[in-house]
Image (cartoon, rainbow, N blue to C red):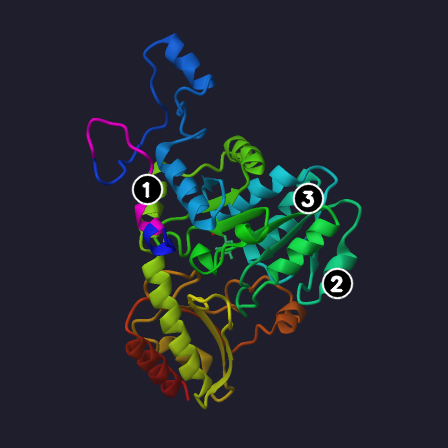
Amino acid sequence: MKFGTKVVHSSLPKNEKIKSKATPIYQTSAFTFSSLEELEGFYQGDSPYLYSRVGNPNTDELGMTVAQLEGAPSGVAASSGLGAILSGIVALCGQGDHIVASEDIYGGTYQLLKEELLSFGITTSFVDFTDHQKIEEAITPQTKLLFSETITNPFLRVEDIEFLVALAKNHRLKTMIDNTFATSFLLQPFTRGIDLVVHSATKYIGGHSDITAGVIVGTEEIMNVVKTKVVNLGVNLSPFEAWLTCRGNKTLALRMSKQSGNAERLATYLRTHPHIEKVFYPKNVSSKGNGAIVTVELSRECDISTFFRSLGWVKIVPTLAGVETSVSYPLGTSHRALPPQAQEKLGITTHVVRISVGIEESEDIIEQFTSALESSL
Ligand SMILES: *Cc1c(COP(=O)(O)O)cnc(C)c1O
């Protein structure tokens, strides 16, 4: 089956007498048993469900669906992207272990690695992943894991997956990659040798800005450990949110295809605009497109506050990936906590704007940005 077919038809097998077309919402904290023998059956693997933190049909459907789309044998849903990342990391690393991570990863992941994982005795070195030699130099005898993102935020650097996989192999390390920005529609890093692939399903998998969720996929062996971590850390997803996420995911191919096409058109147009200093939009990500985020740096003649105020139906939102086009201001939100030197090094200036391109008609999107740029002069 092609991606666009698989994405619509993935759902749990149903064995009930009531043949509902959509998967029902199992909005329950636990499952009942009619005898001690039946209860014992759960532990023998006869019945799959006991208590929703441990497993629920809706969260299973989400984990399984994303695993199938990534070409991985196993997946699990988590309460958020960060919950999924935490579960994956503690499945692979423990007390005394070391991680080498890309320095341009998502701010929340950076905080998790830099602060919270210290309590688990896990340390991280943050390295410029465009410099392959620096990655290798950062590896110590304690290093267990290389961590990066397929497409980074906000400048949309595309990770060299083959290099990371080869390097990990040479040093007997595991690899984990955050595929949130690309989605499995554009890239399937597991099929290229990455051990664990993680998503903030809050973004494109959900697609409608109405849930917070995460998913992580990998081999059966590693995922068995990850699933235990999700249960023990209590970062399970609620059944209703899992259901909404599965519902949103059914249109992933349609949305990503339209949004990537719109983004390509917007990026091409903005490259020719006299008041756009720089356009960041990746090339050759996939044969299906290059993603739906476009980051721009406005020229100094533009008043940035006026620009944001003049965007009409394009709202300022500190997230991305919804069906509506939205903008965010990295200096004021995602990269706010960084020291000024770090902001400067990354290129997060006062005039950088990140655009999450939606499913509207591209002419209207281009028109809205043109008019806001004019107003800002
Ligand atoms: C949003 C995001 C996360 C965190 O996901 P949550 O669902 O907010 O926990 C992680 N990685 C990337 C690339 C993100 O965009």
Q: Is residue 296 above or below residue 122?
A: below
Amino acid carrying label 2: it is Lys
Q: What residue would you read off at disc 2?
A: 134
Q: Is residue 143 above or below residue 340?
A: above
The disc, 3 or 2, on the residue closer to the chain's N-terminal end is: 3
Figure label count: 3
Dot in front, 1 or 3 = 1
Please provide percent x and percent y for residue 69: 43, 49
Foreground pick, 45 / 155: 45
- The magenta span reads 6-19
Q: Is residue 28 left or right of residue 286?
A: left
Q: Secondary structure at mark 1?
A: helix
Foreground pick, 96 / 299: 96
Please provide percent x and percent y for residue 332: 51, 67
Q: Residue at x 27, y 38 (%)?
A: 23
Q: What residue would you read off at disc 1?
A: 243
Please provide percent x and percent y for residue 262: 36, 72
What is the quadrant of residue 144 in the picture?
Answer: top right
Q: What residue would you read off at disc 3?
A: 118
Q: Residue at x 32, y 42 (%)?
A: 243
